[in-house]
Each structure stands twice: as C-alpha cells, then as structure tokens.
Amino acid sequence: MNLIFVNGTMGVGKTSVCRELAKILPENVFLDGDTCLAATPFYNTEAHRALILKNIADLLNNFLQSGLFENILFCWVMHEKEIVQNILSRLHGEFTFRIFTLTCEKEELFARLRRDVSAGIRDGGIFSRSEERAAHYAGFPEKIKTDGKSAEEIAVDLAARLGCGFSAKVYSELPEEAKAIREGVFVREQGFCEEFDETDKKAEHVLLFYGQRPAGTCRLFEREGWHIGRVAVERAFRGMGCGKLLMRAAEERILERGGDCCTLYAQTRAQAFYEKCGYTAEGEPFSEENCPHVAMKKLLRPFARR
C-alpha cells in the first residue's frame, strides 16, 4: 500500500494535480486536507489545529485499514516538516510513504492566485500568505517544478516517479476512451473531418493505458492483408514511448491472428517514427484530406512475403 503526500504552498496546483493523478493510479482514494478544516468561523487556535490534524489522521487511518486501496493520495499545505511528522506519527499499519513538493516561481504563482481571486475562490490576502509559506519548502525532498506545465503533465511525471506502468488491451468494438483520444488528436488538433468510418466496425482497437488512464489508441484490420491505422497518443503522454508500445501491441495481435506482414498509411511528417518501428515506405506520397501520406510496410515474421 502506498501513502502519497503532495505538498506545496497555496495556489501551486496540488489539488488539480492530485485529481489528474487519481485518474492514473490504480485503486486509489484522494483526500484534500482543506476539507478537514472548512469551518466557519475558523479559529486559529492550538485546539482547532490539533482537531484538524486528528481529523486528517483518522481519515487516513480509515483508508489505510480498509484494505480497499493500493494508493492513498493526500494533499495539503505542509510547509513545516513537523506537520508531516505529526500526521505520520498518528498512522497505523504498514505502508510505503512518498512525499512530493510542488514549486513554481513567484511570477507564475501570483498569476495563478490572481485567477483564483478573480474567480472568487480566494481572498486578496492570499498573495502574502502563499509567498510566506513558499519560503519554507527548501529542505523538503523530491521537489517538482510546475512552471509552464499543466496539472495533467505534472500528474504524469508523478505517476512515472511512483513506478506506474503501461499496459495494452484489445477491443472488438471501438471503446469510448479510444474515440475520445482520436477526436482530440485527429479532429481538434489536426483538423480532420472524416475521422470515424465503417472500418471501425470491422476493426479491432488497441487501447494503451498508463496505470488506469487511457494514453493512446490505434486500430488493426484485415483487408487484402493486415493494416494498422489511427495511431494516436494523448498530448500529456508524448515523448514517453507510447507510440512504439501501441505499434508493438498491434503487431503482436496481428501475429496472434496469423498475420505476418503489416501495412499502414502514415502522415509524411510521421514517416521517420514508423521507420524507427521497422516500416519501409512504398510508392509515391498521396493526399488524404489535404494531408500528405505514404504507404509503409513491415514484415512481422522473418522471410514473410510482402
């Protein structure tokens, strides 16, 4: 069982990151420390602070002892190591503990806080309070800079540090998760209009997961030989080898189905990627929805005929 603390000053993005991380990690529960102190009025007294710590520890113990979760996420403004130690000293049972501290430069921190103040989420005094807390995190381990990164990208980074891995599943029908990825990549990003067709009904669909979150997809089908198409990876997972993992999963499925050669129609801007995957261009480039493509082939078994 893993107990994961996400730490950092107000406005650095802890809650948003944990919500994204909860979409990735398997069997997890997320507790935001602020829910344990949402009292009106808030009494800044020793008794009230002790009550908050007790409430946090009680909830975490309930999760730890339930046996229902592999990963327990907790975020809060723990600007002093004594706060972390106080909480940990109240917990029972065996677990692996990790703490990550999110940081960002003052300019970006204040820009985020200004958005929250404008939205009525925070009051104007948050700037000085957050800046004061930020100065306390120098001695914390595993700090992660969040400047210029989305909560999604930071969550992927955290998941990688926690050893989260990829897995692939094959579906006989187009799953909604794969449909959403293709709409995001091919329609919204690249501007294609005719994304879904009759081939989807006849194809098998590979969905690549990062933990429990869908990260990429492709389809495979047989039509005068085996074909792979619609290879798409979510933006947050690019540069992590997802494309190669997708291709490998699709090729292994083709081999299971008795195929020994695979064809695909690659966008010419992606030709180098497919060449690294072992594909060779054949014939002249052609246009599809005003985008240049090229046919490419790969032998999946030695000595197979093209």
Image (spheres, grey):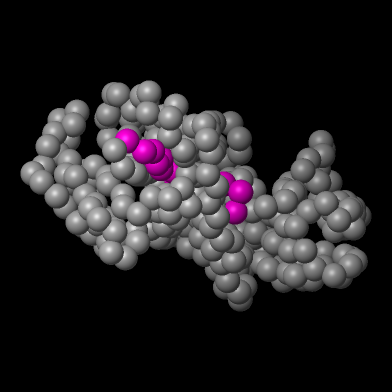
The spot of residue 98 in percent (x, y) is 68, 68
The verdict on residue 221 being magenta is yes
The residue shown at (57%, 40%) is 124
Q: Is residue 133 visible?
A: no
Quarter in which the N terminus is drawn: bottom right
The spot of residue 195 in percent (x, y) is 33, 28
The spot of residue 109 in percent (x, y) is 48, 52
The residue shown at (56%, 61%) is 165
| Left or right of 249 in this view: 155 | right
Q: Magenta segment, which residues?
A: 211-223
The spot of residue 229 in percent (x, y) is 33, 41
Q: How many marks?
A: 0
Res 19 quadrant in image: top right
Of residues 123 and 163, the one drawn nearer to the viewer in this rendering: 163
The residue shown at (43%, 30%) is 202
Q: Is the magenta stretch mostly helix, strand or loop?
A: strand
The verdict on residue 87 being magenta is no
Q: Is residue 304 visible?
A: yes
Of residues 249 and 23, the one drawn nearer to the viewer in this rendering: 249
| Left or right of 229 in this view: 285 | left
Res 243 quadrant in image: bottom left
